[in-house]
Image: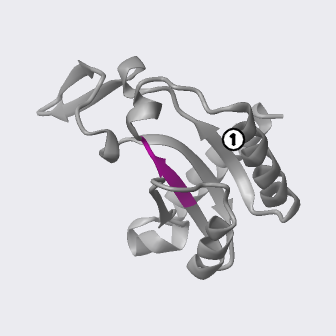
Amino acid sequence: MRVMVMIRADRDSEAGVMPSQEILAAMGKYNEELVRAGVMIAGEGLHPSSKGVRMTFSGGTATVTDGPYAEAKELIAGFWLWQVKSMDEAIEWLKRSPFDGGAEVEIRPVFEAEDFGEEFTPELRQQEERLRAQVADQQR
């Protein structure tokens, strides 16, 4: 199963405070463990919401709202995409992370094709497979 591991923003990340060299080194070591174990598919940190926009779609209209946004605890500061056997395995990996006091991290399963049931027709499955192959080719 694939899971997205989302690191919640805090005052520092929303203020653009960069992690120390010590934290970056610890996270680099942890990421190396994830990669060696075949768990990590992707992982990135995100700029503060002040550098982003939100788009709201309603009645065929898209509204753009510039950041920053009020509730830092509801924002994401970074993420990983992991391939694991179970949610329990994801939890065990996250327990080994170099986070300490105050970090809040959420783990959520990623939808797989079979999760969509009959609505995900063979034609839609083929389209999805084609798109995934194109993305993989573009990343090489």
Q: Which residues are magenta?
A: 4-9
Q: Nearer the viewer, residue 121 or 116?
A: 116
- Left/right placement of residue 107 relative to residue 94 reads left
Q: Is residue 34 left or right of residue 119?
A: right
Q: Residue at x 38, y 27 (%)?
A: 49
Identity, as a three-letter code, of the amino acid under mark 1:
Ile
Residue 47 falls inside the magenta stretch: no
- Is 77 displayed left or right of 45 in the figure? left
Residue, x 30% and y 22% (percent of image)? 67
Task: Please say which color scheme the image uses.
Answer: one colour
Q: Is residue 8 magenta?
A: yes
Picture coordinates of residue 109, whole percent (x, y): 50, 67
Residue ID for mark 1: 23
- 42 or 31: nearer the eye? 31
Q: Main secondary structure of the magenta part?
A: strand
Q: What crowding class fits label 1: few (fewer than 14 Cα within 10 Å), some (14-19), or many (20 or more)?
A: few
Count of numbered tags: 1
| Residue for point 40% across, 29% down | 14
Residue 119, located in which quarter of the rendered image? Answer: bottom left
Quarter of the image for the N terminus: give it. Answer: bottom right
Q: Residue at x 31, y 46 (%)?
A: 74
Q: Is residue 54 above or below residue 108?
A: above
- 139 lies above or below 125: above
Q: Position of residue 136 (x, y in %)?
A: 75, 42
Q: Residue 85: name its quadrant.
A: bottom right
The image shows residue 18, relative to residue 95, as above or below, that is above
